[in-house]
Amino acid sequence: MRIYADRFPTAARQLVTDLLVVAWVYVAIRGAMWLHDLVGRLAVPGRKLEGAGAGLADNLADAGGKIGRVPLVGDELTTPFERAAEAARAVADAGRDQQELVDQLAWALAVAVLVFPLGLVLFGWLPLRLRWMRRAGAAAALRSAPAGRDLLALRALAGQPLGRLTRIAPDVAEAWRRGDPDTVDALAALELRELGLRADR
């Protein structure tokens, strides 16, 4: 893994990681939308039930109104139509309730599907990305400060693998203590490259 990291610059790794995170979020959102639409299809019977019940209730109420105009027996004949219209409205209400339930279920499942992938991004990748941005910003500021390169060199001595350090100089710590400018510059450049920054000011 260390050899792979050496051959693959930090800036490139950051870019690839960012692109993968964007693709991950896109796929998660598309998957949640697909699941929402799939579950939403279960509301089709409810819409048909609502439409049929409402249409039947309107027709029965209309028929009852016309029969109610019949002299003498009109009021008695309208009662069954009114009851049938109320039953049809109840059917329409049941269809409406079924649609609301399916819609709530579709949203709940979509959110549940998004929780895990977005949680990984928000609580896994994002803190690491922000920490890298803070470190890179601080290193960029040190790079242009008078004593900044010494601090970067010291950080490289403390944190870089021994193999990288010995490639700079056989006794790299002693050379740094002497203030050898080439060694200090090489150590600072090593630390900057680790953060994906260029060594030049």
Image (cartoon, rainbow, N blue to C red):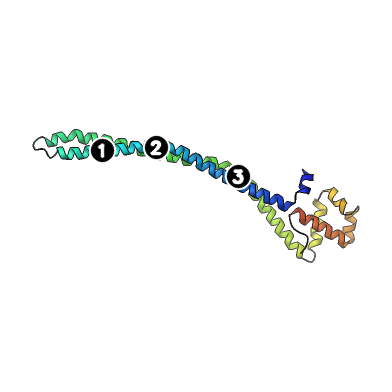
Q: CA distance from mark 3 to mark 1?
A: 50 Å
User: Tag 3's secondary structure?
Assistant: helix
Question: Do residues under tags 3 and 1 come within 8 Å of each other at their CB atoms?
Answer: no
Residue at 83% across, 57% down:
187
Q: Earlier in the sequence, mark 2 or mark 3?
A: 3
Q: Point out the image quarter for the C terminus.
A: bottom right
Across and down, in percent, residue 21 comes to 63, 47
**Quarter holding residue 62:** top left
Q: Which residue is mark 3?
A: 24
Q: Is residue 156 visible?
A: yes
**Quarter holding residue 142:** bottom right
**Quarter holding residue 3:** top right
Q: Which residue is mark 2?
A: 44
Given the image, on which type of amino acid does mark 3 rest? Trp
Q: Earlier in the sequence, mark 2 or mark 1?
A: 2
Q: Which residue is mark 1?
A: 57
Across and down, in percent, residue 106 comes to 46, 40
